[in-house]
Image: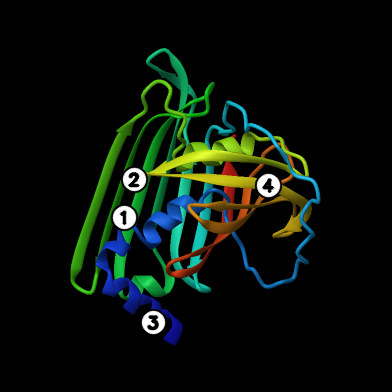
Amino acid sequence: MSAGLELLREVRHDPARGASNGTVRVLGLLVLCSCSHFDGQDPAPAKPSRVRHAAIGTGVLAVPDETIELRATVRGIVFATVQTAIGEPGWVGGRRAIVVRSRGRADGFASLFGDFTWELSSTIDLDSGLPIEDHEEAVATMAGQHEHHSDRRTWEAGDLHHDIHSAIGAVRAWRSEPGLATELAIEIGGGHFTADLTDVAREPHGGKPAVRYEGRGGGQPFVAWVSDDEARVPLGFHCDTELGAVALELVAYDVRD
């Protein structure tokens, strides 16, 4: 309880964190895989001695009618739930495209002291794997203060930056092997950074065979797991942020028949 109160005091000290720059934004970025309990049960494998770099390629793995639910913790305290849904393929301006929507909301300890929601809707070109357009919105109310952030963007020809959804889809589509590294250019709310990613090992995570990735994005190290099968389901993500260690746990996954 005391750890949760300390974290809430930090967020209150900088109300803007509650929407565009803090926990809410981290939740979206983290969907780059989701994460479970980092309790040391799985031994950390040695990093590959030889790292080879390769382009991640074009295209995106987006499973129609797929839904994913993640639970977010900050410093081990449950703070939010994030749900992602993928629609049916269609056509936008003559391009094959699919819509991906995510919504995060306050949960657990955080919901006792305030409320926030974060939403991102992306229309993604299925051939290039890059967004056509997206709309991000975050609303936070805490300690009597209200913050609202909204950003809408259309991608121009030649812009190779990913948003959160297309970055996830690109990683899921990447058929990597141990020792292979790549990088992604990502934009979030007008900010740009490069995420470096290395396929480190094959190991179980959450009771499922998984590919373990280690990397760095925006200067922050992270570890991520994706299921080692055709579905390439995000299984885990852990990242150190300004607010402390952020983890996301996959709590539900479904594909409608």
Looking at marks 4 and 2 on the same chain, the residue that comes earlier in the sequence is marked by 2
Q: CA distance from mark 3 to mark 2?
A: 27 Å
* Secondary structure beneath label 2: loop
What residue is shown with label 2? 189
Q: Which mark is residue 54?
A: none
Q: Is residue 1 visible?
A: no
Image coordinates of residue 97 in percent, x first then y, are: 46, 23
Between 62 and 172, the residue placed more toward the observer is 172
Q: Are the residues at dot 3 and dot 2 in contact (C-beta closer than 8 Å)?
A: no
Amino acid type for the residue under numbered disc 4: Thr
Q: Specify the quadrant of the image occupied by residue 158.
A: top left
* Secondary structure beneath label 4: strand
Q: Specify the quadrant of the image occupied by residue 239.
A: bottom right
Amino acid type for the residue under numbered disc 2: Gly
- Quarter of the image with the N terminus is bottom left
Q: CA distance from mark 4 to mark 1?
A: 28 Å
Q: Residue at x 72, y 38 (%)?
A: 176
What residue is shown with label 3? 6
Q: Residue at x 52, y 35 (%)?
A: 65
